[in-house]
Amino acid sequence: MSETKNPFETLKDNILEYAEVRVKLIVLTVQERLTEIIASIALFLIVGLLATLVFVFGSFGLAILIGKWLGSYFAGFFVMAAFNAILLLLVWFKAAKWIKIPIINFLLKKINNSGKRESK
């Protein structure tokens, strides 16, 4: 004898299966967005580290060059220190506009990205 399911049992099974698939989809979506954010942060850190190295070695090179022009290596390093201090103050006072807001916007864009992939 073939057992036939009650329509309510079939409906219940379908609803449970739908809920299970929906939860899996939500988990996968969260995982995808989280990995995109982590990858973006890792990329930002790597680029930031490389930019820092370029800045440091460039500053040393310019300090030596300026020191050679001025006839004193110490003077070259003090000129570069003053330039870097001015740059630091400029960045400090504009940090919200130049750094904080763009990072917040970038992360919100990544979080709210509806599964669209960026391709270059």
Image (cartoon, grey):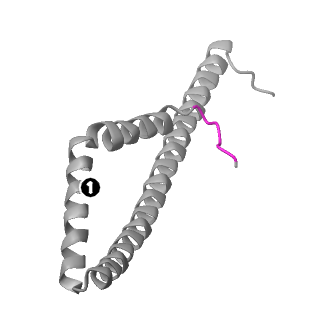
The image shows a total of numbered marks equal to: 1
- Would residue 4 appear left or right of 106 to someone viewing this image? right
Q: Nearer the viewer, residue 79 or 18?
A: 79
Q: Secondary structure at mark 1?
A: helix
Residue 105 x/y as whole percent: 42, 34
Residue that badge 1 annotates: 87
Residue at figure coordinates x 22%, y 55% from the top left? 86
| Magenta-span inclusion, residue 35 | no
Q: Which residues are magenta?
A: 114-119
Amino acid under disc 1: Leu
Above or below: residue 25 compared with residue 48: above
Residue 117 x/y as whole percent: 65, 42
- Would residue 83 appear left or right of 105 to someone viewing this image? left
Above or below: residue 6 compared with residue 1: above
| Magenta-span inclusion, residue 116 | yes
Residue at figure coordinates x 68%, y 13% from the top left? 7
Q: Quadrant of residue 25?
A: top right
Above or below: residue 110 compared with residue 46: above
Q: Quadrant of residue 95?
A: top left
